[in-house]
Image (cartoon, coloured by chain):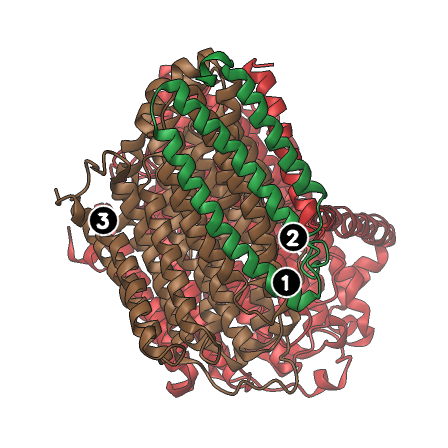
Amino acid sequence: MSVIYELTPAIVLLPLASFALALFFGAWLPRRGAVVGSLATAGTLGLSLATLAWLLLTGEPHNQTWYTLVDADATFDLTFGILIDQLSAAMLVIVSLIAFLVHVFSLGYMNDEGEPGLPRYYAGLGLFTASMLAFVIADNLLMAFIFFELVGLCSYLLIGHWFTEDAPPSAAKKAFLVTRFGDYFFLVGVVGVLVTFGTAGFAGSEGFPVLAEEAIAAGETFFGFGAETWFSVLGLLVLGGALGKSAQFPFHTWLPDAMEGPTPVSALIHAATMVAAGVYLVARMYGFYALLPTVLAIIAFVGGFTALFAATMAVVKDEIKQVLAYSTISQYGYMMLALGAGSYVAAFFHLTTHAVFKALLFLGAGSVIIAMHHDEDMWKMGGLKDEMPVTYVTFLFGSLALAGIFPFSGFWSKDEVLFETLIHALGGSPLLFGAYAMALAAVFLTGFYTIRMVLLTFHGEPRSDTAEDPHGVRWNVKFPLSVLGVLAVIAGGINLVPVEKLSGGSLHVAFLEGYLERDVGLLTHGEHYSELLHDHAGYTSAYVGSEVTTLLLGAGLSLGLALLGAGSAYGLYRGAVPTRHTEKLGGLRTLLMHNYYQDEYQVWLAEGFTVRLSSAADTFDQGVIDGAVNATSSVSLSAGSRLRRIQTGIVTNYAALILLSLLALLVVFAILGGWL
Amino acid sequence: MIAGGLALAPAGAFVLAALALFVIDAFSPGKTSGGVLAGVSAFGAVGALAASGVFLLSGAASGGIELFGGQLVVDGMSLLFTFIFGSVTALVAVASFDYVREMPHRAEYYMLILLAATGMSLMASANSLAVAFVSLELASLPSYALVAYLKGNRGSVEGGLKYFLIGALSSAILVYGISLVYASTGSLLLSDVADAAGEAAATYPGVFGTGVLMIIGGLAFKTASVPFHFWAPDAYEGAPAPVSAFLSSASKAAGFVLAFRILLVGFPIQSVVGAIDWVLVFQILAVLTMTIGNFAAATQERVKRMLAYSSIGHAGYVLIGLAALTGVGGASAGATVLGASMLHLLVYGFMNTGAFLFVALVEHWEIGRTFEDYNGLARQAPLACVAMTVFMFSLAGLPVGGGFVSKYYLFAGAVGAGVWWLALVGAINSALSLYYYSRVVKAMWIEEPIEGRTIAHYPTALYAAVLTAAVVTVFLLPGLVVFDGAAFDAAAALL
Amino acid sequence: MVLETVPVEYYMVLSAAVFCAGLFGVLTRRNALLFLMSVELLLNAANINLVVFAFYWGEITGQVFALFVIAIAAAEVAIGIGIILVLQRNFGDVDVTDATTLRW
């Protein structure tokens, strides 16, 4: 074992140490724990980069049990172990990078603003980071579950940071309960996997995905079910946890409320930890899901539907963080779609670029919120671009990436998701067309709400006193923004599949694809997954005309829709204070004026149709889904309060009830036992 | 192997400590210092704990040592449970130092606790129906008096009365059941009963089946399983909180160990299934107990009563150990789920005792009993509230304490034994339980503190007991590995 | 010997009748002392069974156990009387249905 892998536990232990230090000695630490936290996450980032580099150079993975929790000879052991393969190594870098930048940003957002409870805050961030990192390197499903739960617990603590106000504690509770609801399915799934396979390991020929593959090939049956049926049940149970954490329909309701937490925490939750955990989990055990076409179809549909559903709601939100929250749900929908549609690489690619640009957008929003003295309403902003140029430029880059505009990072990854879905749909899985159509419609909406957000926040005249004289931000805000801003532009460069294809394969620029598909002997590489998808789920590729034609067609379609959405938003919201806009963009304005019909059409589309659809979706969300959740709990509670009335307090009644129950049992068993 | 008499050392430690208190208090009755009383009790309990722990982990009694012509048996299960009784008794004895500091009859209080603990450790070793009944009464009679210990407090007296009356009724049902089993099998020794059970079940199914069912009823009283639980919420709420801790953790575990022994050794399911399918009885009891315990707990206003109902809910989880012995999945599946029940009782001994001792702490401060009275307590007593948070989350089955691992094993074992629906009911109930456990956490940490509440002092012994319980609960998350081998072996030996 | 002439079933019916009388008392008597006496009836019903079947099986285990039950019943009464005494002091009566402050 190489030195680097002996150091792997330190990746988790460093933030854990910062948690312990901040918790116990936070009040005496420099900047209340911020410095220790930043140093620890910087160390983690360094180690993660070294691990990634080592894996890239040597191709030597790591898969080893580290600690045995319960050693049962009769059934199965519960162990902790470390699995470093391409997926986890890359994820480590993403998580530690975002965590590091969030720590630095928090200096500006929390310390400089004089927020209370800082040691608690940094302790929470440390534990949050540590749990997520431990989840990422988990070598088996049970360990993953434990840290998955811890991630949920930390988010509860952090979202409820300002617990003296009304909204944050209830938002924290909601986040916790909704994700826990999914996690109970997950737990049952974990138990099922252990019982079925006797192991919950992810990787290698002893891992459960490979055992599942062999069981299906051998035509085994479990508990009276065929192997594939039983595995689909297990897969769906685990998926419950993933959908809860990744805020997929119908478990998405907690995420917008989670905005009540401090903004850097939102950045961490959305970009790299909590929400990413769900998608990561599915990717982690993709070898298992690739065997199950039904589950894949469900994942794809839930993903596509969530992408569209969340995007429609983002269109009508007034608070900057609310828009971002719905956009997160929507973007994770794309990742789920990619996984369901059989494009593992595209899903991880989108996860990567999204982590960068969403962290950027949240930190940018945080910067705006600092400037606005913690007012989040976009209608009170406006005109901030001149006051805060760094924030504006970086935020704009992030927005263009989110909207999927060429050549920003989001374009490349979203395009690959759509392209892969399309070719698999063409190749004999026509069901995927539905998911593809929904995802495509969401592209339009994404462009629309993103540009609307940028225009309302930064453009036009200031619409309030604070917007006229915003609060300045320091280096500790600008530095993370700049790093992420640059990455948001160039991160697409890690996987320029279209360029490689257009060049006819002569330019090898699909780096991520090559990296993930390389076989390092753990059976967790992309090529293996492609074979499984082909053999078990029947995913094959087909094209309209040639591959290049399909590629250009798909890319053109999604880019066109994104631009159309952006343009519509521009058309509608440019008019906050017309003089400045019209003077600057006279030519375009004239063009739009002359395309009056088009403008009307957009108004209709945006206000007559989209807004209504969005309000309907919002009503559905508030009324039906929240209602169902509330109804379940109130039914339980009222059943409980009726139930407890049998406890009358009169001891003679107790005696009577006990004797009656005994009598009832006697009668039932007398009949069953045949003594009567 | 250890020599015969020495095998009873754990129970002996309880008896000796009780007798020592008797002698010590005889010198100046009622005036012995609380420190001496609590110290001797805790010493005896720790002695029992250490002796049983050493015997258990060294495997000295792995084959099972029979004493007094087979009336008592010391084996892995009895030692594991004596370990639980020892740890709970030690925690309760230490915590009681502050709780009963100002009260009369302190020596009697500690003696009753130790005698009840003696009864419980004999219950763990009982190998005949006669010993089972006598030791059960030895555990019960002091408990009745302990619940009613606060003689001037209406709640305590009422709790004691209800516990006593229902207890007397249940022990009468138990002994009548024993008499019917004796009538049909001609023996009280469990191994002889087992030998005759097949014939008895075939010849006199009515007498035998009624007898078994009445014995189950008597034991279900002791474990506070629905529908024999009615005394429990009232007794736990009325009793002094350390006594509630003692009863809901140790006494319940004692009921379970007796149930395991009697049913598995005395009435092997293969030979009695024709007359009475007790696995099905326990499936019914488990579902009822889990559901009613958790639903009732979710609607309580007072924390102690919520804990009382939650303790009923946990009895339901433990009942899965008997309810899942369907024979599906072979002996290893059975051993897993039964061992998981034992492990759950072990962890529960710490986390539930700790939670009730936290309530004792709050009662000591006299700041009220409802959830609202706990508002913002974390500002004034952060350390104790961290401990309580650990107990609550561990009880709910979150991976912050050993409760996660044991519950996980229970559900896994149930699925492995083919009764996945029991695991499902358990999981749904766990989800519900999180709601009411998190209410406590929310009240302590998130709600605004109550104006004008002052906490004058922080009682050292109570704090020590609460924090010890919390540390052990957390430690048992990775540390349950120390005990799991012993528990699974003990379970396998019974099957 | 009487037992040899009276079939064992008769004793079982007797014991069941005593048991039912005890149950009736438990369910209807509000006076704590009468409740306690009814419980004694329940225990004695069991004792009848134990003694009879000791004869029936030709051994003495049942009889010895019956002695244990009697002794324990005495101990139970001792505790019970104590609790009933404090009940009388706190609630002013020995009616078991008076104490209902703890419920739901």
Q: Assign a secondary structure to mark 2.
A: helix
Quadrant in the rendering for residue A358: bottom right
Q: Which mark is residue C87?
A: 1
| Circle 3 residue | B8
Asked whether the residues under marks 3 and 1 belong to the same chain, the reply is: no
Q: Which residue is at a point 49% across and 12% down the rendered structure image? A: C5
- Which quadrant would the C terminus of chain B be assigned to in this image? top left
- In the rendered structure, the residue with mark 3 lies on which chain? B
How far apart marks 3 and 2 lie (CA) works out to 39 Å
Instruction: Judge by depth and name the residue closer to the eye, A296 or A592.
Output: A296
Q: Label 2 vs label 1: CA separation?
A: 9 Å
Task: Give left or right: position of B10 versus A254.
Answer: left
Chain A drawn colour: red
The numbered disc on residue A205 is none
Q: Is residue B55 above or below residue A586?
A: above
Query: Which is more foreground, mark 3 or mark 2?
Result: 2
Relative to A361, residue B451 above or below = below
Q: Name the residue: 68% across, 69% down.
A: A167
Image coords of residue B268 (percent x, y): 38, 24
Report whether mark 2 lies on the same chain as mark 1.
Answer: yes
User: Residue at the spot x=42%, y=71% of the render?
Assistant: B96
Chain of the residue where label 2 is placed in the rendered structure: C
Element type at mark 1? helix
Chain C is which colour? green
**CA separation, marks 3 and 1?**
38 Å
How crowded is the residue under tag 3: few (<14 C-alpha within 10 Å), some, or many (20+)?
A: many
